[in-house]
Image (tube, rainbow, N blue to C red):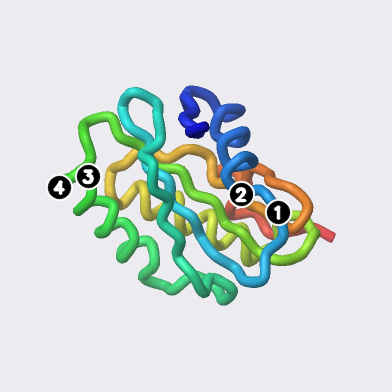
Amino acid sequence: MTFAPVIETQTDVERTWRTLMQPLGWSRTSTWLMLIGPDSRPLPQLTEIEDCDSPPPEDGATQLGSLLAQLQAQVMPEGMRVAFLRSRPGSHRADDLDRAWAEMLYAAARVAGVAAEVVHLATDVDVLALPMDEAALPVTT
């Protein structure tokens, strides 16, 4: 059976990530990139960016944004959008590092001029959204 979701809402994005990231449980931290076509169906490949356990590089938004812009110019049809997910070990909710990565991912999409879905975080126990307006907020204790 082929998994071919239609992604039209935030709920669809979360449901898709929940399905694709099973089983939960991570030994390292990564960022995942999913391209969604103008027909609201994701392309059949996911891209994994490994070694994301440190803060994002200062030029991360520019570098990733340039890559997204190249993809948009060369292979992505008009109306393509991007979805990102950060996966990491642990069961705690989003922390400052997760929020810094989410903020950088949103910025990369802006640099490229590509529409972005809500960034998600997958921990060992759950998948949750990191909305743009919360990405830059520090964790309160």
Judging depth in this view, the residue of 104 and 79 nearest the camera is 79
Where does label 1 land, which residue?
A: 24
N-term-proximal mark, 3 vs 2: 2
Q: Identify the residue shown where x is 68% and y is 59%.
A: 138
Q: Identify the residue shown where x is 46% and y is 30%.
A: 4
Specify the amino acid type for callout 3. Gln
Where does label 3 land, which residue?
A: 72
Secondary element at tag 4: helix
Distance from disc 1 to disc 4, alpha carbons, whole Å, reads 34 Å
**Residue sitting at the far left:** 74
Specify the amino acid type for callout 1. Leu
The crowding category of the residue bearing disc 1, from other C-alpha atoms within 10 Å (few below 14, some 14 to 19, many at least 20), is some
Where does label 4 land, which residue?
A: 74
Distance from disc 2 to disc 1, alpha carbons, whole Å, reads 6 Å
Residues at badges 1 and 3 in contact (C-beta under 8 Å)? no
- Residue 33, given in percent of the width and then of the height, sits at 43, 51
- Residue 136, given in percent of the width and then of the height, sits at 58, 54
Specify the amino acid type for callout 2. Met
Secondary element at tag 2: loop
Query: Which disc, if any, is residue 21?
Result: 2
Q: Identify the residue shown where x is 54% and y is 51%.
A: 85
Residues at badges 2 and 1 in contact (C-beta under 8 Å)? yes
Q: Identify the residue shown where x is 79% and y is 59%.
A: 92
Q: Nearer the viewer, mark 1 or mark 4?
A: 1
